[in-house]
Amino acid sequence: MIKFINRTTFRVECESHDKFLFVSDVHFDSMKCDREMLTRHFDQAKKDKAKIFVFGDWFDLMQGKYDPRGNYSDLRPEYKSITYLDDVIEDSARYLAQYKEEIVFIGRGNHETSIEKRLHTSPLDRLAAIHNYNGGNVMIGGYSGWLIFNLMRSGKAAGQSKVHFHHGYGGNAPRSKGVLGVDIDQMQFPDANVIVRGHTHQKWHVPVVVDRINEKGTCYQQRIHHIRTGSYKKLGDRFAGWAVEKNFNTPTLGGWWLEIARRKLPERVEWKVWECE
């Protein structure tokens, strides 16, 4: 279903009306992760036979050495161990074992790259090694990259759509919520049909209609979907902590459902997007 092309590009083979769940910023090991909501959404994906894509920050992992954001009070009791990092990875593997058919892709976020830089190990690669050994098939991606969706018909590609993902950058964007980046991304990644961003824990969907012309000289309009994926980490009561000191906005929880479908020429492929609450 998903194939490795190179370290920044993956190919996804799918059929018309296949569904996908796009999420990011799960922060699974945080006390503030809304695991009840996460499980509800993942269970719905299993029921609908939807594939799950995580675009960074599956892990929180802020309570280890050298992380200035750490707060011992935010550590789950089961992780208060000398093998903290191992315990979180193994717990994640146990959780994801329920979704071997659904979870297909996890990209890096700033919380994963922080561990790589500070502790010289990749928690996502270690998670994938356990998960795939136990019968899963999850691919680990970078901080940004491409997903090329091939819409299959009778064993052949009948249409293609490109998704560009980037975990996100900058601050919490308290006024714009990051929407000002839409025009910049539209300019910088003109080949993308869907542009996915995370990191700020904000959540929105901005469709942009652009004019296109194909190799036959046919002019048409195409809808490009800009998606900010939200989070599963609650802010709490604003008593203290990194997010409180930085005065971050209250996050909007959940992700997005997407459905791909075949349509008539010239566009061939269209996406439907709706909120996962």
Image (tube, helix red, strand yellow):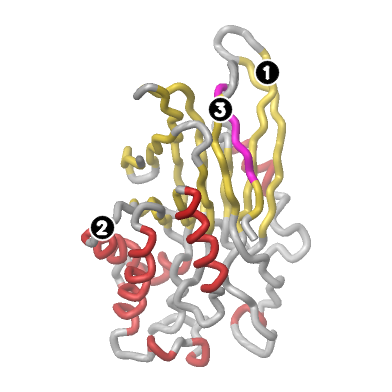
* Residue 218 located within the stretch drawn in magenta: no
User: Which residue is drawn at the image coordinates 60% and 52% (left, top)?
Assistant: 256
* Residue 269 located within the stretch drawn in magenta: yes
Quadrant location of the N terminus in the rendered image: top left
Which label lies toward us, 1 or 3? Answer: 3
Q: Which label sits on residue 269?
A: 3
Q: Which label sits on residue 220?
A: 1
- Tell me the element at label 2: helix
Pick out the residue farthest to the left.
133
Spot occupied by residue 257 in the image (x, y as percentages of width and height): 58, 49
Dot 1 crowding, Cα within 10 Å, few <14, some 14–19, many 20+: few
Dot 2 crowding, Cα within 10 Å, few <14, some 14–19, many 20+: some
- Tell me the element at label 1: strand
Amino acid bearing label 3:
Val
Question: Who is closer to the viewer here, 236 or 165?
Answer: 236
Position of residue 65 relative to residue 105, above or below, is below
Spot occupied by residue 44 in the image (x, y as percentages of width and height): 52, 57
